[in-house]
Image (cartoon, helix red, strand yellow):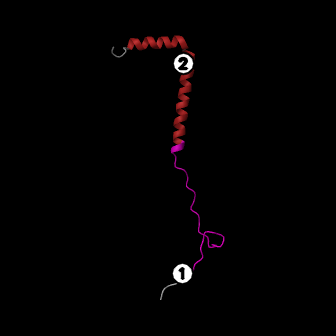
Amino acid sequence: MGSFSIWHWLIVLLIVVLVFGTKKLTNIGKDLGGAVKGFKDGMKDGAADPVAPPPQQVTANKANDPNTVDVDAKTKS
C-alpha cells in the first residue's frame, strides 16, 4: 500500500488521453494557462499604488465654508 510507481501514472495518463483525446486536453491546457495569466495580471494591477489626489489648497474665502467658525483671537494682557 505504498505510493504509486511511475508505471501506474503512465497507465493513468494513457487512459486519460484515450478517453478525452489530445485536442480536448490541449484546449483545456490553453484555457487553464489563460486563466492563470489573467489572474496574475489582475493581481499586478491590484497591487499598484493608486495615485493620491493632490492636496486641497486653503482658500482665503472662509465665508463659503459652513464648518468654519469666525473668531478673533485676542491676547491676554
Query: For the view shown, which residue lies furthest in the bottom direction?
Result: 77
Q: Bounds of the magenta span? A: 45-73
Q: Residue at horizontal 59%, vertical 69%? A: 58
Residue 25, numbered circle: 2
Q: Earlier in the sequence, mark 1 or mark 2?
A: 2
Number of residues whose C-alpha sits closer than 10 Å to that of mark 2, classed few (under 14), some (14–19) or many (20 or more): few
Name the residue carrying label 1.
73
x, y percentage for residue 25?
A: 54, 18
The relative height of residue 37 versus residue 50 in the rendered view (above or below) is above
| Residue 75 highlighted magenta (yes or no) | no
Label 2: state its secondary structure: helix
Residue 52 vs residue 67, the one in the foreground: 67
| Residue 51 highlighted magenta (yes or no) | yes
The image quadrant of residue 66 is: bottom right
x, y percentage for residue 41?
A: 54, 38
Q: Residue at horizontal 55%, vertical 25%? A: 30
Q: Residue at horizontal 52%, vertical 40%? A: 43
Q: Quadrant of the N terminus?
A: top left
